[in-house]
Image (cartoon, rainbow, N blue to C red):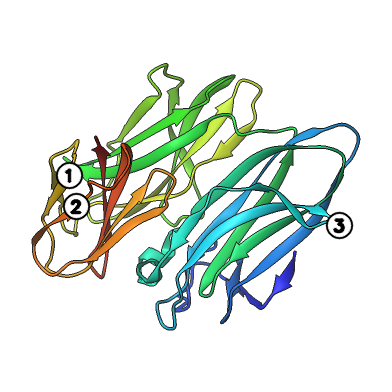
Amino acid sequence: MTGGPFNVIRTNGTAYGGGPDNARNGTQYIDVTSAAGTVFQNFTISGSSTSISFGGYFSSREQAGYVNWTASINIVSLPSLTVVATSSTRAFTVSDGASPAQENWYYLFGNVTLPAGNYRFVANIGNYGNFDAAFVFANCTLPILLTSFSGDYKNNAVNLMWTAEQNIDFSHFEIERSDDAVIFKQIGRVDLSTANQYSFRDNNILTGSRYYYRLKMIDLNGKSAYSSLLRIQTGGFARLSINPNPVTNRLNIAGLKSKGIIRITDASGRMMLSRVVQAQAMFVDVSHLNKGIYLLQYFDGTETTVQQFLKN
């Protein structure tokens, strides 16, 4: 891929102060130096109209000099440079650059049917951002639309929860776990449910450890796609308590450490609000949020805790 101004950082799980210690896929990723920009790759659709899936992974660098930015991927028609498709997006803020939040990779993707012609895959990266694992698949749409993916540590087990839609010709989920966000092993399987709500309990864990989870989504023809990564710390962090859940106006939060940052994102990872924590308990007004599922993320300066809630 071409573009700039960027560095390509090579990592093998070694400490790197400017961003994630591990690439999302492999040992290289693009690391933005000091300005927003794009990376791009041209490709051609031959013959008749073709359905494609496209996407990639984004994350943040350190907080110093940070400028808020929005990650996305465009498919552009050549030579007109007309945008014909845009991926899901994610708004990154300075809190994403705090360790260990900068270790989180966010999976953005889209689908489009294109006539024969020349096109360009364009990844939009902001100042202090990272990008990895770009892909374009022809004649391969995602087998299912994942609308939320969250988890928590409770009663000596990790509980994963997710919801999904558009499950035509879908087969099952495979749950994968990793100790280092690089090497993953399958630990379970969950078949398609007409309720579109799923869960999995991982009892084989060690207290005080950090685990990374992802879902492999497989359709009836064997095609597959991955969810974004979910990191769970088993003990050693603040235990959040939120109520009421579901909530209409005021969400009460307890179990804080009198410092840190509270963030609320929607199911696609888009930032909805951010608040500085200055007490062990607080509340946030969520009356302006649309009905749906949201994630409350609390970063205390060391670890990130995530809770899911429903807005009525």
Residue 243 falls in image quadrant:
top left
Q: Residue at x 42, y 63 (%)?
A: 103
Q: Measuring from the top left, give residue 251's x and y in whole percent.
A: 16, 48
Q: Amino acid at mark 2?
A: Asp
Q: Secondary structure at mark 3?
A: loop
| Front residue of 66 and 286 | 286
Which quadrant: the N terminus?
bottom right
| Foreground residue among 206 and 65 | 65
Amino acid at circle 3: Pro
Q: CA distance from mark 3 to mark 2?
A: 47 Å
> Looking at the image, which residue is at 37% across and 19% down?
195
* Label 1 crowd (10 A; few <14 / some 14-19 / many >=20): some
Give the numbered dot on residue 285. 2
Dividing the picture into quarters, in which one does residue 291 lie? Answer: top left
Q: Residues within 10 Å of mark 3 (few under 14, many from 20)?
A: few
Q: Can residue 34 be seen by looking at this rendering?
A: yes
Q: Which residue is mark 3?
A: 79
* Dot label at residue 249: 1
* Secondary structure beneath label 1: loop
